[in-house]
Structures are given as structure tokens and as C-alpha cells.
Amino acid sequence: MTTKPDWELPGSEAQLTALTREMDEAHREVLPLMHARAAEHVEELHERGTVRQLHTERNLARRGFLLGVGGVGAMAALAACSSAGTQTPDTRAGTASGGSYTGDLKVVALAVALENQAVAAYKAALANAKAGTLGTVPPAAATFMQTAMSQHEDHAKAWNAVLTGAGLAAITGIPLSNAAATANAVNSATSTAAVAKLALGLENQATETYLYAIGNVSNSGAIATAASIAPVEAMHAATLNFVLGQYPVPDSFISTSKAASPSMLTV
């Protein structure tokens, strides 16, 4: 009986370490700009009156509910609403009671969900590597996964700041229609190469989604935020192509054919 040989990194660990370091340097350089652009996004929402409109819609909906309850029941409902407002939002849904993600904010919600999904995928892969289910994992590959995961966490925080700045709940879960399938695929992987292939799909989708957003959202702050993050996502993808022994930039131009659609959101 022969055993399956462990997967080997096509290039050297020194090369992968250098690529990861360059990726992290690029991320750190763009981080202040990313947060500044996200703040501009919130400011523009306030200037347009989008935030005021969202609050008005929630207040009207709440008032209609209370009038429908009537009398003592209305007082009880009001107390319940006031109490519920101090609780932590449901991480499964990612929205607060009465909240809604519409227009450009729905694209922001999609971006957070995609970033959270990438974080979860890398986290699961690292846990599986530690458990030994991926075979031998080169230390440089583990470092790349840890670095990419951390950067996706930073991206999610920037986008969530926009949502909370608009008075909506931060998205802490993965409200995507493909969440379960993606998680199952990651946990079924049995090698670093298999994980890299799955992660490459997520990174390409995120990059293309940001490129699509740049040309299709109206908020200038959202456009600038997406533009500051997209190059880092593209570097993730390029590094994963290296891990898989593929040419780092397989296409002359990145398309948007694999961009995620807001219809994937389950909130």
C-alpha cells in the first residue's frame, strides 16, 4: 500500500514569505486611507439625508406598530422595544430590529459579508492545518493565511463603520446564500493546495465585486473605499496563484463576471 505524498509548494518558502510581506506592507500603507474614505462615505450619507430618511422610516414603522397594539399593550411594547435596543444585534441575521440595507448601503453590507466569509474560511483552514487534516502545511503558507485573514478583518471593520455610522447594525455573521456550501468546502479540503484554490475563488470574487461597485454605486466615499481595498484583494489572489504554481496575473484585465450580487444577501 502506497501513501499519498504531501503537497509541496511550487516555489520556495522564501519567495512566498517575500510576497506576503509585500502584501502586508501594501495593506498597512492603504489602511489610513481606507478608514478616511469610509468616514467620507458616512459623511456623504448624512449630507444627502440618507441617514435621516432611514431613521424616519424606522420611526414610522415603530409608531404604526404601537398604534396597532393600543392601550396598555402599547406601553408594554414600547418598554420591550427600549429594552431590546440595548441588546447585541443577532449575529446570524446581522441586522438590528427595523434596520434595512438599501441602495449603496446594500453593497456595503455585501462587502462586509464577503470579508467575513473570507475571514471564516482562513480561520477554518488554519484550524484544520493545526489539526493535521491538511497534511504538511509549509510555515510560509500558514503565515500567508494568517496575514490575509487579518487584512480581511480590517476591511470588514472599515465597511461596518459605514453601516453603524448610518445607524444600521454591523454585520458580524455571514448572511450569504452560499455560506454553508463554502464552509463545507473549506472543511472538506485535505491539502494546502485545495484550500488555496478555494481561497483564490473567494479573493477573485471580492476583487471583482469591488471593481463592479466602483462603477455602479453613487456614493463617492463608497467608491473610494472600494478602490482602496481592491488592490489588496488582488494581491491576495496573485499570491494564491503563486502557491498553486500558476501565473500570478492570468488575465490582462480583471473582469467583473464573477462579482457577487446583492441578491446573495440573506438580510
Image (spheres, rainbow, N blue to C red):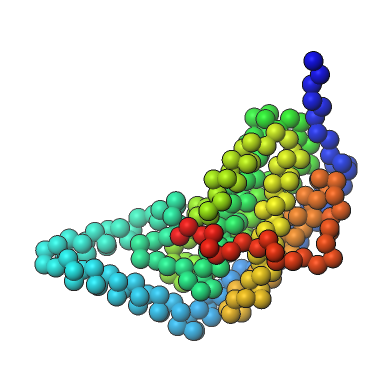
Q: Residue at x 58, y 78 (%)?
A: 219
Q: Which residue is drawn at 77% across and 65% down?
A: 254
The percent position of residue 131, horizontal first and vertical second, equals: 64, 30
Answer with left or right where residue 38 lies relative to residue 50. right
Question: In which quadrant will I find the N terminus?
Answer: top right
Is residue 124 in view? no
The percent position of residue 161, horizontal first and vertical second, equals: 52, 66
The percent position of residue 216, horizontal first and vertical second, equals: 62, 76
In the image as oriented, which residue stretches furthest toward the left? 71
Is residue 67 in view? yes
Q: Which residue is drawn at 70% across and 55% down?
A: 203
Question: In which quadrant will I find the C terminus?
Answer: bottom left
As rendered, which of 99 and 143 lies closer to the eye?
99
As rendered, which of 167 and 213 lies closer to the eye?
213
**Residue 137 image-quadrant placement:** top right
As rendered, which of 117 and 254 lies closer to the eye?
254
Q: Which residue is drawn at 60% across and 76% down?
A: 217
**Residue 78 image-quadrant placement:** bottom left
**Residue 49 image-quadrant placement:** bottom left
The percent position of residue 110, horizontal first and vertical second, equals: 55, 62
